[in-house]
Amino acid sequence: MRGEFGTDGFGQLREAIVHAGSIERWADEFASRSRGICAAASARTDARLESELRRFAAGRELFPTCTEFGDASQVGLLGALRRHGGVELWAARLEMPRRQRYSGRVAVAK
């Protein structure tokens, strides 16, 4: 690890870290802080996504299809839903049934 800091031009930073505790101490502290930050950011993101999705899905009886997201220029929203739990989760959260892929039949979200 010492070599990596030096190779990357951070040799002095490594020495300061070692003198101010240890590499492990600071790694643990930053990991615990980032977990808290990520959890808070995720909660805010989920709330924002749900708000945007509810607006987009308003007036629909079925959860929007991929084609409908695309036709409405909402592919960014669809991608975000996929990254934050998946479309099935969001359909269930909105209590909206989805069309089954390729069949056209309606499947109730669980």
Image (spheres, grey):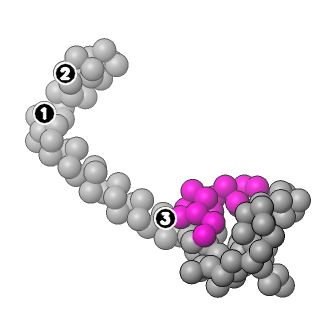
Give the residue type at disc 1.
Val
Q: 62 above or below 29?
A: below
Q: Quadrant of the N terminus?
A: top left
Q: 44 above or below 80?
A: below
Which residue, as the protein is rendered here, is positioned at the far right? Answer: 71
Find numbered disc 2 in the image and state the secondary structure of the residue it sits on: helix
Give the residue type at disc 3.
Ser
Find numbered disc 3 in the image and state the secondary structure of the residue it sits on: helix
On the image, which quarter does residue 89 sit in? bottom right
On the image, which quarter does residue 4 sit in? top left
Q: 101 above or below 98?
A: above
Neighbour tally class for label 3: few under 14, some 14-19, many 20 plus, Cα within 10 Å: few
Residue range in magenta is 74-88
> Where does residue 54 sit, x and y in percent of width and height?
72, 78
* The one of 66 and 53 positioned closer to us in this rendering: 66
Give the residue type at disc 2.
Arg
Among numbered discs 2 and 3, the one appearing first in the sequence:
2
Residue topped by disc 2: 2
Neighbour tally class for label 1: few under 14, some 14-19, many 20 plus, Cα within 10 Å: some
Residue topped by disc 1: 18
